[in-house]
Amino acid sequence: MRRLFPVTDVTDETAAAGGADAREWSLAELAAAYAYPEPGPDGPAPWLRGNMVSTLDGAAQHEGRSQPISCPADMRIFGVLRALADAVVVGAETVRQEGYRPARARAEFAAAREAAGQGPAPAIAVVSASLDLDFSLPLFTSPLVPTLVLTGAAADPQRVAAAEKAGARVVVAGEGAGVDPGRAVHALAERGHTRLLTEGGPRLLGQLIAAGVLDELCLTVSPMLTAGDAQRIAGGPSVTVPRRFTLSSMLEEDGFLFTRYRRA
């Protein structure tokens, strides 16, 4: 792993050596590189970051899953981002396709999470209007931290009851059947979840972008080409004017670029 941006004396020395002194970063170094913003004078404000991977030709998945276009370094960063978060926001379709399981506690981050006033692991917050979910899965029945289900006020009462019976906590975050992204972020912050991470899928990320609530995007650029008709990292509604983000940092390993963009 080597840092390409921001440019520092160490960055310049590494580049001059052709990356010869690049090494595997420790989890603590990665955590420092991806730290959430410090709370302001009025206390912590919600900060929503996205974490996605894309091939060179813009595919966010291969055969319906992101794992084939990832790499070990990407998975290390994936784990660090989860370990820093209060809650991981994910769409129902991604839960179904990726076989989501509860977030696990990691001994390497236990002291840091306790010092930050966080629980042993982030909560998983599933966004679902229909609540068409298998509530017998471990994600709902045996998480270390209760799973949250974000839905609309008009959600099917029987499905709501099934979610709650399984142990999930249902959070109303929208009128009608849908979920309002801004209201969802606010509802999570009210429950103490201000350090937020979304892992998609593309439809949910597109909704968050369109609503203007995404503060940061951590994008892994995979040096692969897949062609086909796979989804981009974001889909759904378009925005009237493209959202401008600025490059905050860029790391590299084995041809993969690990970029971090913040809202301009």
Image: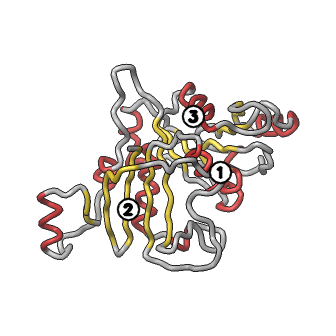
Circle number at residue 103:
none
Q: Is residue 143 above or below residue 182?
A: below
Mark 2 touching mark 3, by CB under 8 A?
no
Mark 1–mark 2 Cα distance, whole angstroms, equals 26 Å
Say what secondary structure mark 2 lies in.
strand
What residue is at 55 percent from the left and 69 percent from the top?
Answer: 67
What residue is at 17 percent from the left and 70 percent from the top?
Answer: 15
Circle number at residue 237:
1
What residue is at 41 percent from the left and 37 percent from the top?
Answer: 113
Task: Give neighbour class at mark 3: few <14, some 14-19, many 20+ (Cα, 10 Å).
Answer: many
Asked whether, in this view, residue 24 is left or right of residue 244, the answer is: left
Mark 1 touching mark 2, by CB under 8 A?
no
Identify the image quadrant of residue 87: top right
Mark sitting earlier along the chain (3/1): 3
Asked whether, in this view, residue 38 is left or right of residue 93, the answer is: left
Q: Amino acid at mark 2?
A: Phe
Q: Amino acid at mark 1?
A: Pro
- Residue 92 appears in the figure: yes
Where does label 2 land, which residue? 258
Identify the image quadrant of residue 218: bottom left
What residue is at 62 percent from the left and 41 percent from the top?
Answer: 125
Circle number at residue 185:
3
Name the quarter where the N terminus is drawn: bottom left
Task: Give neighbour class at mark 1: few <14, some 14-19, many 20+ (Cα, 10 Å).
Answer: few
Mark 2–mark 3 Cα distance, whole angstroms, equals 25 Å
Rendering coords of residue 189 (x, y %): 53, 29
Rendering coords of residue 165 (x, y %): 79, 36
Mark sitting earlier along the chain (2/3): 3
The label nearer to you, 1 versus 2, is 1
Identify the image quadrant of residue 236: bottom right
Asked whether, in this view, residue 55 is left or right of residue 99, the answer is: left
